[in-house]
Image (cartoon, rainbow, N blue to C red):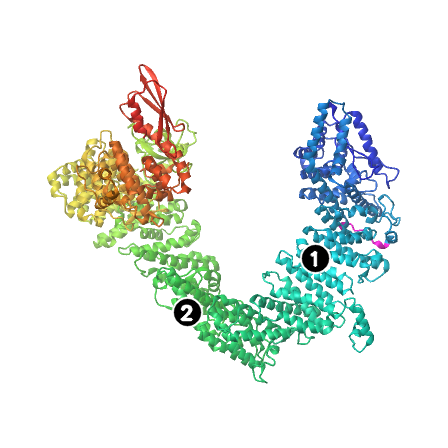
């Protein structure tokens, strides 16, 4: 390397001593002197090689030569070529070639080239040199492919140089290049092949433009001739290298020699290193060397093969073959440059002139199997397209063929080898025809050794050796087809040689591996034998003379032939191989059924042999036909001892013979004729050589069936019988039947056979599903039998007799239908006796008619049964359902078969049967009942009504004879049932013009009648009925709009939902079920419609209404209001239906404000008219439902139009406009509000983020701050997206107010609408009707409704008008103050009459309570009203103990208490003094003791009182706890919580039927009505003061434990138990604690085998546990050991209950340990004795997810603030994971023991990792927190690390800081061992004990 680089040279060893040298790869890197010499030498070499046949004068273009070095001046190209020529790394070379292409020869998309034309030419010349000397031989395919791409890219840049070097012309500079590229087209790598093919196609497609057509043709021909010469030269060059080392040395050894000579001598050490390096290199290159050699040789072999196939040599008639054949015995000349003895015309090409035969078959004897295989292919191609070379070397090849056959052992080579041998032998025929003018059929020349032929005996010996070994495992499927042509080429008269070949081939089937190969060999044997038997003899006249026994001369000739093996014995031997092949097929086991080629081959040969036996005497078959058909074939086809598989194969063989016979007759132009069941050629005799054997088998099969126990045949026997009948026909089979009297007619015998044998088979097989295929065969036999009967009457009689017997035997309808289908599909329609031979005349009979009617009735019954089962009206019996479904399926098949849908032709039944079917299937439409319940069983979407489906198909057929009425009935029934039957057939029939109008009227009338009829009281059934109704309405709508789009405007009228009077009736009292039904029907119907625009279009009946139908809309909304009494104050639930309906129509965005405003006016006028009627008729009860519904609708619409009014405005001076305020008031923000967060409150352009207020922090009151979470940007519960902020960074609007003038105008316009709405309500509904005189004179319920109207006006509109005299604000304020004054005066007088109660109730409702409207907390602020007077009067009233005692019961008094609660819940928001809150708590406690009475606690009124009480308590607590001077440490709140806990544990029902929907309406969960308010109170007290809960809950601990197993109560019960467990002190105290009875019994059993001292300790432990744990909890965990419900079949409720109970137990244990450390040991000992830990861990690990170390949500799954629970239930996996965590944390010793002894091995590693990564760090954090929060440690500071598990305690002693380190090893196996290492001199023992106690 460097300046003293070695001079690299190389020399190709062509096997000739005087071969010229060529320059090495990297000669361009040598010094100038050497490179010049190398260049000169290379140029001289190339010039010498290309001088043959070239003109003396050459142009400058033709003088271009590949350059051994790049002589250009571009440094980049020099560097690139250095990488290509000197680097061995394939990646480097590939990249360099790609870089060269881009830099020197870029494509059009890559831009222009960076080199000049001259530089490009120099680069191209050097690249050609590198390709021919190095890159072509590179082992890496990417290098070979890339260099071809570069050569292809150079065409457009240097076209002249490209043509001069690459075009294969006689003047080309480098002819080897074309040969290399051609051989690269067969490269083993796909990329190289693709690139080389593209380049070669471009080269061959390139033409020269000489201007003259003749010259262009000559040039083209010359190009192709030169290409072949180039490939042949390259072939000779490469095959000259005998070994891989020879090729390697020729390519690379010259470099090494050059390097050594060009450098100065080095020292001895340097030489040794060089030699060692060469040895190492040769070892490393050995593999590459062998790979290169094999690839290159295979490429040239396959390339030459491709060349021969693509460019075959010219016609040999123009070639002097005499010179190629006369000197065959002489030595073959090796000089390939010697001119051929052909004609002087150089435009013709012969491969003998270009190739040396020694090189061609050089590798026939090589040890490389791949070389031999490629050579076989090459020689085979030469035998076809390069015969000149073959003919010139026939003597050598004829001697090689047997030796090659003998020596070949590679299985993969035999297909190519046999093909080569076959083509070589066949080439003699062409030679004979060309030279000797002999006919090509003469095969003797190939075996004439005097004419360079093959020695037949030697060849046969070698061939038989190969065949007997099965070609050494080669696939016979590949080489088997070559056997027949090979036999055809054998000497024709040598019978012995033929039999020898057949013997070897037959022996080969015994050694094959696969059955497919064996079958291929057997097929080859059969084909060869058939050919030899059928081949025309050479001397037919001698054959005929030889058969003449009287001719003595012929006898002498026959005797002479006996010696040659052509006697009858030899022919029999040949024929015997066919019989053996047939026997192999019939009796060999494990023959694959899919291999159909062997029976087809045998059948074809049998047919040919049978035909030849009748027609020909000039073949060998004529000599042995008697023996062959009378002895040979019958011996094989006999079924005496045959098995089922042989019978199947024999039947298949007969079928193939028959199919081939039909094909042959059709091919020859003969017309087949029917003979019985057979089809025979018209010009052949009706007999056949196979008939006798078939008849014998037929008789044996019949005899077997008659003599067997069951009287039937097996499946294979039946199939063989069918094949025999179809092949021979009854005419032959029953001829001369000995079982019948002589002279019996064939038809009588056939009838007898049908009514006895065949009928017995059919009935016997009917009951077994496994005999279905055999039954099908029986029916086909029956079909042949009927076809054999001559008259229609006979056929009909036999058929009806068979059918009657089948009906009597109760045969499966599916099998009957199968028989009908087979009979009608194959019966001949031409056989006739004058009555007509049509199929329906034969099959149609009265018996079939009666059966069809019965089947129709049964199908309807089965369908109705299955439909009733689907609708839940029958018990679920899966066995019965499956049986009924199977019957229905069979009936469906039978009906469709009778109507012949799958076949063309008329029905098999009469039209009268069809009408009876229609009458049966349409009973639901014909009934007078309008109850959907009665018709519900007919509603079915599964499409299982087989009879209806069949009838609809018939009605749609052109041949249908049904009337219009009948078609309407069918379409109505299909419309009612729906499903796929309606979609595919029913809708098509109903939309036909003839019946559409009638159908539309009938279906509409049906829908209207069903809509107004009463349908029962069961809610689930009503929902099912309404859903069915809506589906039918939707189907009618779809049909009508499909027929005519204009029908969509009348859809509501069509289905009956546009009737306003009907909707009015739904709002009447007592019609709640009708309202619910109308609601369900309407909603289900609208849900089927996609798109709000289309829904509105259908609902309103017009596309774009100018005036919306507000009247219909209002009455629909009024009817949809839910008025359940239990839903008091649940406005969301009351309007949930209309909200869903509203959203379906598009909601606020889809409906215009003008339309909503019009609806509001319509509601007000509707309510006003009802009020007027009430005053006129003095009847309020009848119209109360209308009023309550109407006021709720009015409030809902006002909310949609205006929303909830809030004072978010800033007032300006009078006359100025108002603008929406952007800031929010901190005191008005509550949890759950959606606001907009801004980082910089002073910037107006700051982007705002939508957030949700998660928590309001009041610890710095009145300076509030808030925790917010980004809304929509993070997953709920993701604390990473939460942040804390203050009120001035929260805004009410998404965007700041940019234009206050426009905003003020918009607000002003909205305010005008609000004012108009206020005036409308006050004028028509409220004014003068809430005055005190009116209250005393009108119904109380009416007054309450008027008060709700005021609530709507205030909360929705805000009284935004003027406040002067006569204004709405003034009137409302006057009403409110009058009501309060009346209440205060009444209380002052001690009057708590109904009037006072009503006034107070109206006051509460008007100020925001909202009995029938949405509640509001802003009414006091909007109206600026203070309820101080009424609150003061109520407080003073309830302070009177005597009055309270006297008025604690009674209906009137309880009503007053209830109303006081309502008023407090509204007015509490205005109170700001802590003393008043304390008094209110006392009032609430007093009222609670009155209302929540146990005696009436389970009534509906008590439940409503409970809801009111809890709502008031919750509102009061929330407001009171925000008051600064209020403290919750008072007895009233504790008494209230105690009362509520008592109601929770013993009074409130866990009934979801009386529940409300918790959550939004889309994903609502039905829960008891008391649950949500109780959870809210519980959460609030858990956050503010747990003492309120703890005070009275201890008394209910046992009941709370039991409630852990109740679904809707377990969350609350667990939270209360958690508070109890955290409380200080025992549950049960005293000297003696009474243990539960179960615990006492178990304690006695535990002490049975203990020592006295141990028993006493156990008793003490149990006593300690009983003082701290609830006794119900103890009894539960003690029962786990024998309770089997802890296994996999445990219910979810049980699993959750026991998991929660265990967590509670651990909480109690922790609390006991805090009180006294000894308690932990006692309770742990008790738990260990119960065995509960093993059970609970087994249960928890079944559901826990302990292998997910990233998920930590389970840690807070029982917390009150967990979002997953939300106060309603728990997630089992999270609870289970927490159980494992808490158990390891609290009871580490017991868990360690369980882990060692009882933990399953599959879970041990997971548990260990869970303890290591979850329990240990959290335990350390908790203990450190306990240490830091502990008292009595002075100034000591304790810190720790969860990673190192090291605790550091820093304390001060003698004014010096000392550190003590404690390494805490919380090992995942040992769990909680620790060790203390100190680094200080003095450690206080107190600290050690403290750490030990806390870390234990």
Q: Give the class, few, some or many, for how many residues have Cα within 10 Å of label 2's Cα (few <14, many ≥20).
A: some
| Front-most of residues 1057 and 1006 | 1006
Question: CB atoms at circles 2 and 1 under 8 Å apart?
Answer: no
Question: What secondary structure is found at the residue carrying circle 1?
Answer: helix
Residue 467: which disc? 1
Marks 2 and 1, the one that precedes in the sequence: 1
| Front-most of residues 1146 and 619 | 619
On the image, which quarter does residue 271 sit in?
top right
Is 311 covered by the magenta stretch?
yes
Q: Which residue is mark 2?
A: 858
Q: Is residue 1378 left or right of residue 29?
A: left
How far apart, in angstroms, are the residues tagged by discs 2 and 1?
68 Å
Q: Is residue 1246 left or right of residue 542?
A: left
Q: Is residue 810 above or below residue 1818?
A: below
Q: Is residue 467 left or right of residue 36?
A: left
Q: Give the class, few, some or many, for how many residues have Cα within 10 Å of label 1's Cα (few <14, many ≥20).
A: many
Q: Please tell me which residue is depicted at 72% across the width and 55% down the height of the picture.
A: 418
Q: Is residue 1166 above or below residue 773?
A: above
Q: Is residue 1669 above or below residue 374?
A: above
Provide residue 1598's location: percent of width, then percent of height. 23, 43
Is 651 covered by the magenta stretch?
no
Q: Residue furthest top?
A: 1855
On the image, which quarter does residue 1844 sit in?
top left
Residue 1306 visible, this orientation: yes
Residue interval drawn in magenta: 309-317
Provide residue 74's location: percent of width, then percent of height. 73, 28
Question: What secondary structure is found at the residue carrying circle 2?
Answer: helix
Q: Is residue 1011 above or below residue 1618?
A: below
Quadrant the N terminus occupies? top right
């Amino acid at each position: 390397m460097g300046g003293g680089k070695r001079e690299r040279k190389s020399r190709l060893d062509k096997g000739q001593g005087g071969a010229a040298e060529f320059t090495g790869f990297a000669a361009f890197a040598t010094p100038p002197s050497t490179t010049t010499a190398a260049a000169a030498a290379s140029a001289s070499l190339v010039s010498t090689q290309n001088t043959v046949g070239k003109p003396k004068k050459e142009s400058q273009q033709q003088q271009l030569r590949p350059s051994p070095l790049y002589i250009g001046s571009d440094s980049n190209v020099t560097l690139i070529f250095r990488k290509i020529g000197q680097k061995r790394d394939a990646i480097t070379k590939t990249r360099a070639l790609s870089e060269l292409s881009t830099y020197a020869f870029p494509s059009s998309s890559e831009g222009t080239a960076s080199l000049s034309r001259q530089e490009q030419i120099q680069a191209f010349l050097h690249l050609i040199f590198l390709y021919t000397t190095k890159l072509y031989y590179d082992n890496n395919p990417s290098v070979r492919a890339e260099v071809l791409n570069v050569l292809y890219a150079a065409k457009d840049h240097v076209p002249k140089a490209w043509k001069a070097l690459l075009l294969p012309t006689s003047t080309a500079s480098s002819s080897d290049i074309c040969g290399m590229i051609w051989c690269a087209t067969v490269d083993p790598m796909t990329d190289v092949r693709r690139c080389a093919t593209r380049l070669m196609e471009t080269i061959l497609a390139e033409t020269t433009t000489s201007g003259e057509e003749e010259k262009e043709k000559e040039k083209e021909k010359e190009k192709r001739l030169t290409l072949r010469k180039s490939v042949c030269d390259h072939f000779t060059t490469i095959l000259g290298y005998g070994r891989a080392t020879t090729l390697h040395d020729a390519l690379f050894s010259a470099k090494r020699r050059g390097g050594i000579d060009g450098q100065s001598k080095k020292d001895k050490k340097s030489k040794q290193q060089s030699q060692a390096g060469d040895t190492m290199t040769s070892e490393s290159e050995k593999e590459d060397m062998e790979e290169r050699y094999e690839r290159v040789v295979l490429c040239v072999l396959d390339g030459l093969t491709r060349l021969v196939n693509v460019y075959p040599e010219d016609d040999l008639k123009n070639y002097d073959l005499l010179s190629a054949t006369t000197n065959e015995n002489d030595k073959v000349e090796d000089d390939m440059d010697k001119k051929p003895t052909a004609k002087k015309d150089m435009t013709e090409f012969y491969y003998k002139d270009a190739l040396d035969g020694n090189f061609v078959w050089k590798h026939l004897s090589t040890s490389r199997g791949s070389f031999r295989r490629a050579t076989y292919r090459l020689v085979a191609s030469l035998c076809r397209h390069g015969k000149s070379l073959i003919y010139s070397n026939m003597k050598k090849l004829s001697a090689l063929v047997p030796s090659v056959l003998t020596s070949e052992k590679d299985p993969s080579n035999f297909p190519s080898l046999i093909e080569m041998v076959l083509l070589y032998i066949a080439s003699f025929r062409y030679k004979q025809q060309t030279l000797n003018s002999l006919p090509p059929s003469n095969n003797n020349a190939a075996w004439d050794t005097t004419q360079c032929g093959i020695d037949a005996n030697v060849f046969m010996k070698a061939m038989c050796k190969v065949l007997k070994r099965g070609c050494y495992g080669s696939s016979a499927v590949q080489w088997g087809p070559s056997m027949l042509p090979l036999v055809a080429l054998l000497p024709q008269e040598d019978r012995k040689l033929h039999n020898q070949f057949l013997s070897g081939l037959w022996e080969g089937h015994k050694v094959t591996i696969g059955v497919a190969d064996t079958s291929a060999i057997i097929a080859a044997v059969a084909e060869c034998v058939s050919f030899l038997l059928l081949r025309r003899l050479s001397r037919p006249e001698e054959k005929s003379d030889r058969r003449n026994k009287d001719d003595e001369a012929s006898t002498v000739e026959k005797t002479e032939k006996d010696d040659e093996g052509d006697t009858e014995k030899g022919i029999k031997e040949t024929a015997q191989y066919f019989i053996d092949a047939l026997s192999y097929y019939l009796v060999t086991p494990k023959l694959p059924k899919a291999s159909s080629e062997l029976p087809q081959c045998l059948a074809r040969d049998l047919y040919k042999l049978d035909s030849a036996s009748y027609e020909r005497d000039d073949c060998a078959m004529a000599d042995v036909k008697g023996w062959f058909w009378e002895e040979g074939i019958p011996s094989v086809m006999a079924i005496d001892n045959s098995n089922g598989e042989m019978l199947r194969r024999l039947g298949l063989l007969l079928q193939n013979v028959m199919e081939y016979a039909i094909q042959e007759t059709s091919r020859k132009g003969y017309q087949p004729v029917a003979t019985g069941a057979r089809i025979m050629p018209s010009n052949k005799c009706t007999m056949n050589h196979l008939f006798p054997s078939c008849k014998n088998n037929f008789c044996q099969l019949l005899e077997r069936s008659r003599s067997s126990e069951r009287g039937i045949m097996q499946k294979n026997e039946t199939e063989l019988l069918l094949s025999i009948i179809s092949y021979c026909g009854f005419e032959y089979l029953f001829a001369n039947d000995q079982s019948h009297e002589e002279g019996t007619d064939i038809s009588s015998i056939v009838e007898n056979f049908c009514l006895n044998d065949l009928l017995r088979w059919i009935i016997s097989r009917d009951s077994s599903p496994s005999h279905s295929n055999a039954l099908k065969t029986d029916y086909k036999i029956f079909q042949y039998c009927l076809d054999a009967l001559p008259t229609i009457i006979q056929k009909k009689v036999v058929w009806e007799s068979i059918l009657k017997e089948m009906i009597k035997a109760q045969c499966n309808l599916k099998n009957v239908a199968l028989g009908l289908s087979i009979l009608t599909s194959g019966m001949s329609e031409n056989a006739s006796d004058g009555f007509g031979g049509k199929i329906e005349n034969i099959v149609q009979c009265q018996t079939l008619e009666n059966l069809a009617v019965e089947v129709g009735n049964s199908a309807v019954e089965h369908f109705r049964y299955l439909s009733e089962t689907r609708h839940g009206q029958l018990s679920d019996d899966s066995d019965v359902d499956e049986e009924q479904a199977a019957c229905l399926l069979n009936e469906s098949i039978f009906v469709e078969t009778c109507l012949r849908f799958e076949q063309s032709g008329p029905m098999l039944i009469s039209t009268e049967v069809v009408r009876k079917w229609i009458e049966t299937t349409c009973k639901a439409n014909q009934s007078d009942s309008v109850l959907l319940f009665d018709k519900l069983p007919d509603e079915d979407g599964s499409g299982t009504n087989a009879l209806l489906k069949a009838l609809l198909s018939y009605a749609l057929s052109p041949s249908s004879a049904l009337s219009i009425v009948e078609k309407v009935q069918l379409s109505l029934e299909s419309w009612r049932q729906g499903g796929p039957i309606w979609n595919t057939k029913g809708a098509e029939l109903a939309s036909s013009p003839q019946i559409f109008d009638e159908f539309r009227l009938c279906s509409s009338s049906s829908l209207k009648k069903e809509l107004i009829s009463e349908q029962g009281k069961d809610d689930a059934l009503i929902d099912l009925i309404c859903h069915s109704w809506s589906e039918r309405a939707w189907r009618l709508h779809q049909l009508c709009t499909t027929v005519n789009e204009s029908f969509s405007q009348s859809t509501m009228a069509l289905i009956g939902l546009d009737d306003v009077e009907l909707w009015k009736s739904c709002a009447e009292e007592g019609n709640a079920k009708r309202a619910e039904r109308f609601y369900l029907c309407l909603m289900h119907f609208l849900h089927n419609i996609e798109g709000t625009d289309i829904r509105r279009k259908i609902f309103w009946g017009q596309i774009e209404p100018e005036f919306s139908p507000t009247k219909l809309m209002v009455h629909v909304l009024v009817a949809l209001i839910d008025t359940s009494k239990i839903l008091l104050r649940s406005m969301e639930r009351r309007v949930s239906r209309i909200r869903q309906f509203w959203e379906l129509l598009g909601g606020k965005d889809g409906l215009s404000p003008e339309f909503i405003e019009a609806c509001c006016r319509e509601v007000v006028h509707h309510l006003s008219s009802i009020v007027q009627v009430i005053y006129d008729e003095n009847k309020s009860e009848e119209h109360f439902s209308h009023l309550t519904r109407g006021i709720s609708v009015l409030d809902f619409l006002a909310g949609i139009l205006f929303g909830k009014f809030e004072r978010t405005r800033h007032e300006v001076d009078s006359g100025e406009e108002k603008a929406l305020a952007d800031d929010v008031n901190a005191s008005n923000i509550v949890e759950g509000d959606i606001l907009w967060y801004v980082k910089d409150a002073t910037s107006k352009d700051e982007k705002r983020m939508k957030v949700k207020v998660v928590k309001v922090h009041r610890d710095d009151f009145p300076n509030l701050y808030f925790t917010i979470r980004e809304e929509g940007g993070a997953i709920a519960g993701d604390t990473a997206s939460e942040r804390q902020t203050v009120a001035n960074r929260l805004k009410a609007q998404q965007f700041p107010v940019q234009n206050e003038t426009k905003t003020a105008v918009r607000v002003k316009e909205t305010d005008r609408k609000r004012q108009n709405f206020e005036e409308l309500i006050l004028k028509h509904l409220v004014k003068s009707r809430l005055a005190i005189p009116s209250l005393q004179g009108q119904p109380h319920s009416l007054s309450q409704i008027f008060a709700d109207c005021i609530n709507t006006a205030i909360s929705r509109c805000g009284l935004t008008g003027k406040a002067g005299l006569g204004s709405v604000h003034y009137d409302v304020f006057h009403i409110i103050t009058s009501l309060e004054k009346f209440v205060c005066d009444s209380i002052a007088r001690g009057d708590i009459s109904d009037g006072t109660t009503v006034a107070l109730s109206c006051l509460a409702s008007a100020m925001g309570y909202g009995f029938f409207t949405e509640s509001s907390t802003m009414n006091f602020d909007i109206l600026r009203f203070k309820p101080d007077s009424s609150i003061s009067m109520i407080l003073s009233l309830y302070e009177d103990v005597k009055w309270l005692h006297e008025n604690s019961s009674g209906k009137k008094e309880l009503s007053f208490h209830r109303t006081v609660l309502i008023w407090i819940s509204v007015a509490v928001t205005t109170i700001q003094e802590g003393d008043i809150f304390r008094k209110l708590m006392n009032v609430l406690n007093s009222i609670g003791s009155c209302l929540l009475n146990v005696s009436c606690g389970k009534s509906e009124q008590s439940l409503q009182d409970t809801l009111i009480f809890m709502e008031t308590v919750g509102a009061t607590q929330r407001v009171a706890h925000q008051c600064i001077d209020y403290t919750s440490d008072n007895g009233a709140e504790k008494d209230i919580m105690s009362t509520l806990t008592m109601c929770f544990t013993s009074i409130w029902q866990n009934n979801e039927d009386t529940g409300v929907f918790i959550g939004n309406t889309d994903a609502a969960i039905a829960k008891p009505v008391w649950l949500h308010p109780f959870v809210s109170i519980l959460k609030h007290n858990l956050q503010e003061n747990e003492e309120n809960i703890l005070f009275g809950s201890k008394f209910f601990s046992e009941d709370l434990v039991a409630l852990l197993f109740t679904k809707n109560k377990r969350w609350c019960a667990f939270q209360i138990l958690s508070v109890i467990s955290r409380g200080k002190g025992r549950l049960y105290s005293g000297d003696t604690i009474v243990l539960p009875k179960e615990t006492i019994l178990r304690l006695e059993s535990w002490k049975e085998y203990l020592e006295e001292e141990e028993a006493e300790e156990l008793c003490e432990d149990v006593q300690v546990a009983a003082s701290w744990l609830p006794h119900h909890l103890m009894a539960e965990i003690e029962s786990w050991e024998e309770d089997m419900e802890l296994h996999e079949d445990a219910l979810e409720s049980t699993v959750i209950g026991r998991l929660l109970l265990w967590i509670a137990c651990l909480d109690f244990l922790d609390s006991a340990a805090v009180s006294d450390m000894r308690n932990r040991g006692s309770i742990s000992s008790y738990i260990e004795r119960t065995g509960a830990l093993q059970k609970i861990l087994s249960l928890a690990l079944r559901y826990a997810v302990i292998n997910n170390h990233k998920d930590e949500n389970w840690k807070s799954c029982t917390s009150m603030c967990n979002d997953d629970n939300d106060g309603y239930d728990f997630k089992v996996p999270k609870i289970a994971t927490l159980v494992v965590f808490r158990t390891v944390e609290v009871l580490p010793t017991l868990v360690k023991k369980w882990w060692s002894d009882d933990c399953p091995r599959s879970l041990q590693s997971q548990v260990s990792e869970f303890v290591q990564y979850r329990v240990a760090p959290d335990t350390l954090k908790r203990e450190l927190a306990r240490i830091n929060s502990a008292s009595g440690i002075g100034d000591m500071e304790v810190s720790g690390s969860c990673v190192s598990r090291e605790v550091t305690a820093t304390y001060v002693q003698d004014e010096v800081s000392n550190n003590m380190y404690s390494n805490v090893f919380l090992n995942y196996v040992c769990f909680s061992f620790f060790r203390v290492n100190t680094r200080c001199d003095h450690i206080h023992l107190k600290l050690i004990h403290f750490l030990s106690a806390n870390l234990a």
